[in-house]
Amino acid sequence: MKMTRRSFLSTSAFTLLACGLAPAAHAEETNSLLTGLLGSKAETALPPKPLTAKVVDANPFMGFSESNIHHDCYNTDSTDAVLPIGICPEVNVAMEKVNPNASPAIFFDNFDNPISPFLGGLAIRDLDAEEVTTRGFFSPTKHDGGGYVIQSSYSFVDGRNLIVCPTSHNHVLMLRAADENGTPLPVFEKVLDIDIKAAAEKVLGRTLDQKLLSVVFDYEGNLWFVTGGFRIYPSRGQQGAMGYVSHAAIEAILAGGTADLDHEVHVYAPIAGEGAENGIAACKEGAVILTNLACYLLRANNGVEVVWHTSYNSVGAKDSHEGDATTGGGLAWGSGCSPSLSRDLVFFTDNLDTVSLLALDIHTGAIVASLPVIDELPANMPVSVENSAIVYDHGTGTISTIVCNWFGAGSPNLAKPDNDSSIQSYENIYDRNWLMKGNSMIMPGIERVDTIRTGDGWTMKSVWCRDDLSDTSMMKLSTATGYIYGFVQDVDSGMWQYIVLDFETGRTALTVDVASLYGYNNMAIGMYAGRDGNKLYCPTGYKELLRLQDRFVYLPEMPYRKVDLDKTRRTVVSAAEFAAAGGQGTPATWLHTVTFDNLHPQTIAAIRVNGLTGKASDYKLYAKGTDGQYHAFTGSWSLENASGRLRAQKVYEIRFTLQDGGDFDLSMDAKEVTAAILLAR
């Protein structure tokens, strides 16, 4: 289903009048769901459309949280966390005062501490204060003699809560960043340092021209690595490598001993001119590596076992030509993707003039389905997919992928023979005109493709395609809300905006304006889901880290006081979890946990919720007690403005009375109340 710019403008990307916001700039008509509501006193928001949680086999050697920039070792770019749904949305800012830009890559440790680049290294930082502050860090210049930087894009947190990171001088480091309680260490402790390139060269008996690019743990604890960078030209004959450091060697070094790397580093040498251009994925079958020429499944078997090797086609590096609307091009020579996985399939795009999405059998490497994508753009609009596809596998035989066009973002300097494309910096990677002029300099195109299991194998079909949006970020899917989140620039007003797309239809469900200045370009870094269910981080080209949040809680008796949103949490509670903890019925809302500071006696609080249907009498309020169990709320409470039939898009208020030290106060501090409540049906 192709949807044009005109057809999408006729669907209102609504905002909330009752929260003091103006209607969306391009709303020509009002969505039928919202007719009669926007002009009233009732607030409206995106009704949650929860999806089944994503299916990803847990890797015991990877972190428990959103442990890398693609969220997990399958590189799904999807999260089961709650994200904002437009309940009185607001954009808050944390100012960067040390780094040259707002944190460009964020992931989380096992205690939900956010980790981001800092002074050429990595840091745990407070990203929610008015000014970004550092709680602990490791900087090569300050702590390790300098001469290199950490490649933050392909760093991750492991199951021990250690940060694993490749460096620009071809080492892999492991850093202890927090104590056993999750408290950040002021200076991270380096607990492992291996010169991967030197070890691989010794094993191979020859020099490697490519640099270390990416690392990942497989499900047996072997640390896989690959060399490469953007624009690995086969004709230049650069020699690369892929391989692993054995689990035994990692354990020996972490225990304070040594390892014989001559026998514990295992290497496979692809043909000269072949190398990776993005990250690695891992699954129970092994490590999946995509090079500029082929996709591999590699397994540790007292050496590198090539389980399968599947070639794919590419027209090579794509660049703009004289007279084109764009000045940049693509980033990669081959596929611009890191491979994305489901339990059964590997997904990536080729790099032909008409780009296709490919699905490979995880066991055999056979191409079981393919489909041209973003292939209905107007003439002279090239396509170059430069990010891993969002992959959502709900375990019932249909796997959804979202692919985005990014042609125009890549720097023309990537084509120069002396360019070191392994250096992950804005100046080295991105087209200056795109950075300065915004999304008029990149080509549009976003498409959802479903891969469906049939009696004969697999088939692909296009579900929807947008030819009017140029997304500047790595989009994220929230299974908790059922929406896709991105960051775009309105082509008419120049306004940079958070954008929320309906996963089912692709229609624009919500936009939240940020600014029209060019520096608010997100620069293709990505959207980062906060771990509290109410933050969507977006780095910018300025020194501002944006975070979109819902103002879902307030104090009706004290409208002058704003509840600190950074002391709130929204969590999905399943029916089984609810019942196991004493609840009766089925959760009808997320669990809302809020801390109220300096609370007066007998204070009324209000939680804004939507997604309700039926009658108000169908619902009962539950609160979590200090015993960890759910109890029917025994105090005074009401569901405001809930007469008649409830409507899913309408926002209602749960009003309830709080008492410091009362039955449902989870905080031990005086004059501070923490409450955790949900509605059940």
Image (cartoon, rainbow, N blue to C red):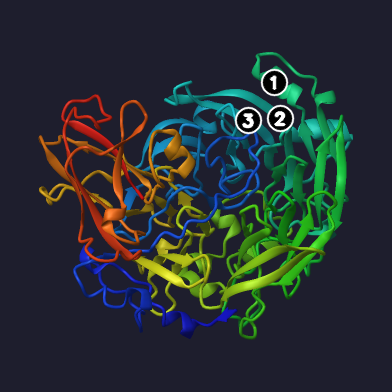
Check if mark 3's residue and mark 2's residue have beta carbons within 8 Å: no
Q: Is residue 382 visible?
A: yes
Where residue 597 sits: x, y (%)?
A: 19, 36
Mark in front: 1 vs 2 = 2
Mark in front: 3 vs 2 = 2
Query: Which residue is denoted by mark 3 in the rendering?
Result: 173
Q: Is residue 31 visible?
A: no
Q: Give whichever of 413, 495 is nearer the camera.
A: 495
Check if mark 3's residue and mark 1's residue have beta carbons within 8 Å: no
Q: CA distance from mark 1 to mark 2?
A: 9 Å
Q: Quadrant of the N terminus?
A: bottom right
Density class for disc 3 (Cα within 10 Å; few <14, some 14-19, many ≥20) is many
Q: Secondary structure at mark 3?
A: strand
Query: Which residue is denoted by mark 2 in the rendering?
Result: 221
Check if mark 1's residue and mark 2's residue have beta carbons within 8 Å: yes
Q: CA distance from mark 3 to mark 1?
A: 14 Å
Question: Label 3 amino acid?
Answer: Leu
Along the polypeptide, which appears first: circle 1 or circle 2? 2
Query: Which residue is denoted by mark 1 in the rendering?
Result: 251
- Judge left or right: residue 19 versus residue 171: left
Mark in front: 3 vs 1 = 1
Along the polypeptide, which appears first: circle 3 or circle 2? 3
Question: Label 2 amino acid?
Answer: Gly
